[in-house]
Amino acid sequence: MIDLHCHILPGVDDGPRNLEESLKLARFCVADGITVITATPHCHRLLHLLRNQILPHVVALNQELKSAKIPLTVLPGFEIQVFDSDVYRREFEEDVYCHLGDRKDFTLLEFNWAASMFPRDSVELIEWIRDRGMTPIIAHPERHDFFRDQPELLPPLVDAGAWIQITAGSLLGNFGDEAKAFGEHFLNTHREAILATDSHNVERSSGLSAGYAWVEKHLGPERALDLRQRADRVKTTLLTNGEK
């Protein structure tokens, strides 16, 4: 399995504080059946990481995983918070972002948690990203109050070409009843979806297998297979050598 949203890099953001915690999380993920992770540290106004800053951390962690004989591959990425569409466009063009796998196929976007900062031109931004050949994936919409309180906000983003990323822990009730209910609702409503863990450490990680099992039980084996196959296609893309 591939986990497309995971804060596994040590000492970078609010994920593991040190290498020991990172390796502990890595072992947990491998035991769960995860073989590939895209490391997605936060990139927002308060922690504005740049692509050239994060790549060495990924190289170093992969070396430590190899030394520890942990069969896990970590790819680079960011969880990019969109707080101003013009800033996003400018920095996208300046190539300061690290998209998933450090490629131009998929990018993980987060919207600010404050409803007042939700970009009103968000649909146009999704279309702009799609016009550049990239698929934007919206992180954990089930946990955002404004997507729940304003049901008209998310469908236009999906119609414009965005995928959604539902956190496995939300489906298991780890983020409350509302996140669980809306996680199920969004999976029922929007076909182009991905499951991920949004792990920060072993205490805040449900793994992926429990999420797929929940989907199979509650939404049916066909939906669970669809989610797995979509994630596998992304994994194949990110691991393919050649033009990035």
Image: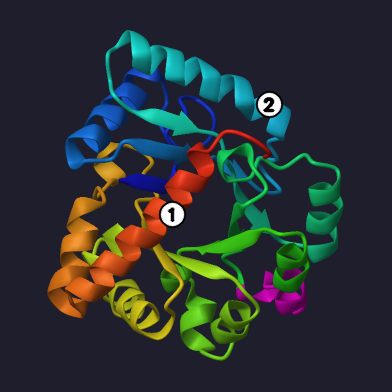
Predominant SS of the magenta segment: helix
Amino acid at pointer 2 = Gln
* Location of residue 24 in the rendering, given as x and y in whole percent from the top left corner: 27, 26
**Does 37 appear above or below 61?**
below
Amino acid at pointer 1 = Arg
Q: Residue at x 21, y 78 (%)?
A: 219
Which quadrant would the C terminus be assigned to in this image? top right
Answer few, some or many: residues within 10 Å of disc 1's Cα (few below 14, many 20 plus, some between 14 and 19). few
**Does 217 appear above or below 17?**
below
> Quick one: SS at disc 1?
helix
Q: Quarter of the image holding residue 110?
A: bottom right
Camera-side residue of 13 and 217: 217
Q: Quarter of the image holding residue 187?
A: bottom left
Q: Which mark is residue 77?
A: none
Decide if residue 119 is in sight here.
no
Report which residue position mark 2 lands on: 53
Where does the magenta region start and end?
115-125
**Does 224 appear above or below 22?**
below
Camera-side residue of 152 and 36: 36
| Sequence-wise first label, 1 or 2 | 2
Answer few, some or many: residues within 10 Å of disc 2's Cα (few below 14, many 20 plus, some between 14 and 19). few
Q: Residue at x 59, y 53 (%)?
A: 106
* Location of residue 128 in the rendering, given as x and y in whole percent from the top left corner: 78, 68
* Location of residue 87 in the rendering, given as x and y in whole percent from the top left corner: 83, 56
Camera-side residue of 17 and 189: 189
* Location of residue 222 in the rendering, given as x and y in whole percent from the top left corner: 23, 74
Decide if residue 141 is in sight here.
yes
Q: Which mark is residue 233?
A: 1
